[in-house]
């Protein structure tokens, strides 16, 4: 195999392995669904570096995610891979895939409204209930069980639910 | 064996990152003190979340300060091994939590500045600072809304909550002048387009504060006398106690992890 083919093969194996890593707080979402996995670089010496971006500055899941990536790559026969955190461009909920939004809803968490511009950060007045679909819902707290979620309640089915807030 | 303190070679950009990082760490630590004690469960979670955002911002800023200094000081060394006089934070953020009104007013005074400040810093000529600003800006927007909504509820609430909210505004007012200060080191960065002149955000801050105080039926203090010194390491007595709690484990068991 040529060097380029080997590099591209390494890249694919590394990506496939990293793509199996899930968010420790929301295990139905992979880091690809979340848009956290940004890039993989394969060096001329065959070294692998995975670039991830944090969702929130202080998200404690990032350390676990970095560890899980190293583990997943080692299992895939790529030991010694490094994980690098990139801050720019800043992560936004717009990077969450459609598939990710669907999985989130099925898991009982309302997905973020698309178009996370500044208006969308604060423009959301109604979040459909992920359990019964009613739009008759209310915000209980801007800050939920993790940094990325707010706490809402459905007035129709009376169930409280998490809302993955726009960012 | 206790570990010795470090000193940092404070070039303008290192000093800049330490100042903004210290603001975020000290305020984040203050908010973490509410965990388990906040007036209700949702608020307990909210204050812990905001504290976590701030500590996350501090980590990015410290990491960058350490890289630019190039003396092997990582985020942990900068947080745990500098003495009080080497901390460069605003006096505002080290003030004790007091009652819930004091915590909310402190948060409003800081967030009403941090939100437009980080937004302006997204255009910094320094790519790392611009990236940190882009993350911090979105977080600060939520923090500002949280503090504004609470102060309006407290000020325009019962006689008791109104009195306490006004007490807090009066008590913390003299710490707000420092938000807009600059010195020679920072002016160098402002001239290079690396930092934003905080004085240019004065009108935005005033407008936010006036709007929230008005809606909260609270009076804006007319005292113009302002406390200062935090940026140069001259602190109120409160910071030393805070650092004793924050640092004692690393000072007693250097390099301890869990």
Image (cartoon, coloured by chain):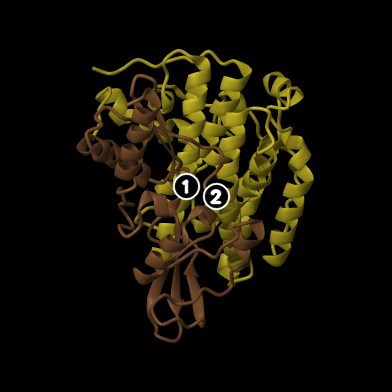
Chain colours: A brown, B yellow
Q: Which mark is residue B139?
A: 2
Spot occupied by residue B130 in the image (x, y as percentages of width and height): 62, 35
Which x, y percent locates residue B128?
57, 30
Instruction: Give the vertical position of B99 relative to B199 (above or below).
Output: below
Q: Nearer the viewer, residue B166 or A31?
A: A31
Q: Give the side of residue A11 with respect to residue B51, left or right.
A: left
Q: State which quarter of the image contains the C terminus of chain A.
A: bottom right
Q: Residue at x 73, y 27 (%)?
A: B193
Whether residue B106 is visible, yes or no, is no
- Numbered disc 1: secondary structure: loop
Q: Nearer the viewer, residue B227 or B122?
A: B122
In x, y percent, where is residue B157?
59, 71
Give yes or no for contact between labels 1 and 2 (Cβ–Cβ under 8 Å).
Answer: yes
Closer to us: A36 or A18 = A18
Q: In this view of the protein, which residue sits in the foreground, A3 or A50? A: A3
Residue at the location (65% across, 56% down)? Answer: A118
Q: Quadrant of residue B120?
A: top right
Q: Say above or below: B230 vs A69.
A: above
């Amino acid at each position: 195999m040529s060097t380029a083919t080997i590099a591209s093969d390494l890249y694919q194996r590394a990506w496939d392995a990293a793509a199996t890593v899930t968010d420790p707080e929301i295990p139905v979402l992979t880091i690809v669904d979340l848009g956290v996995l940004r890039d993989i670089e394969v060096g001329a010496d065959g070294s692998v570096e995975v670039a991830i971006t944090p969702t929130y500055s202080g998200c404690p899941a990032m350390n676990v995610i970095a560890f899980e990536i190293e583990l997943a790559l080692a299992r895939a026969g790529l030991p010694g891979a490094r994980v690098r955190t990139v801050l720019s461009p800043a992560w936004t909920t717009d990077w969450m895939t459609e598939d990710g939004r669907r999985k989130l809803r099925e898991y009982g968490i309302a997905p973020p409204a698309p178009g996370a511009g500044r208006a969308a950060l604060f423009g959301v007045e109604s979040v459909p209930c992920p359990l019964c679909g009613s739009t008759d819902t209310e915000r209980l707290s801007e800050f939920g069980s993790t940094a990325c979620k707010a706490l809402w309640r459905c007035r129709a089915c009376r169930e409280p639910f998490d809302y993955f807030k726009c960012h | 064996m206790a570990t010795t303190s470090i000193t940092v070679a404070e070039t303008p950009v290192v000093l800049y990152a330490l100042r903004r990082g210290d603001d975020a760490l000290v305020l984040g630590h203050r908010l973490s003190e509410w965990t388990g004690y906040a007036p209700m469960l949702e608020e307990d979670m909210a204050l812990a979340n905001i504290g976590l955002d701030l500590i996350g911002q501090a980590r990015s800023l410290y990491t960058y300060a350490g890289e630019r200094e190039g003396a092997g000081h990582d985020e942990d060394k900068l947080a745990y091994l500098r003495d009080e006089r080497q901390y460069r934070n605003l006096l505002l953020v080290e003030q004790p939590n007091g009652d819930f009104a004091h915590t909310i007013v402190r948060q409003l005074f800081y967030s009403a500045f941090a939100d437009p400040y980080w937004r302006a810093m997204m255009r910094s000529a320094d790519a790392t600072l611009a990236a940190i600003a882009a993350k911090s800006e979105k977080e600060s927007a939520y923090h500002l809304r949280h503090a504004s909504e609470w102060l309006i509820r407290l000020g325009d609430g019962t006689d008791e909550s109104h009195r306490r909210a006004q007490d807090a505004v009066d008590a913390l007012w003299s710490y707000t002048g420092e938000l807009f200060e600059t010195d020679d080191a920072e002016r160098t960065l402002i001239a290079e387009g690396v930092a934003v002149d905080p004085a240019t955000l004065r009108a935005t801050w005033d407008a936010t504060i006036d709007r929230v105080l008005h809606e909260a039926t609270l009076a804006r203090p007319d005292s113009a006398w302002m406390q200062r010194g935090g940026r140069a390491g001259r602190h109120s007595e409160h910071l030393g106690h805070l650092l004793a709690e924050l640092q004692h484990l690393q000072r007693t068991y250097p390099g301890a992890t869990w």
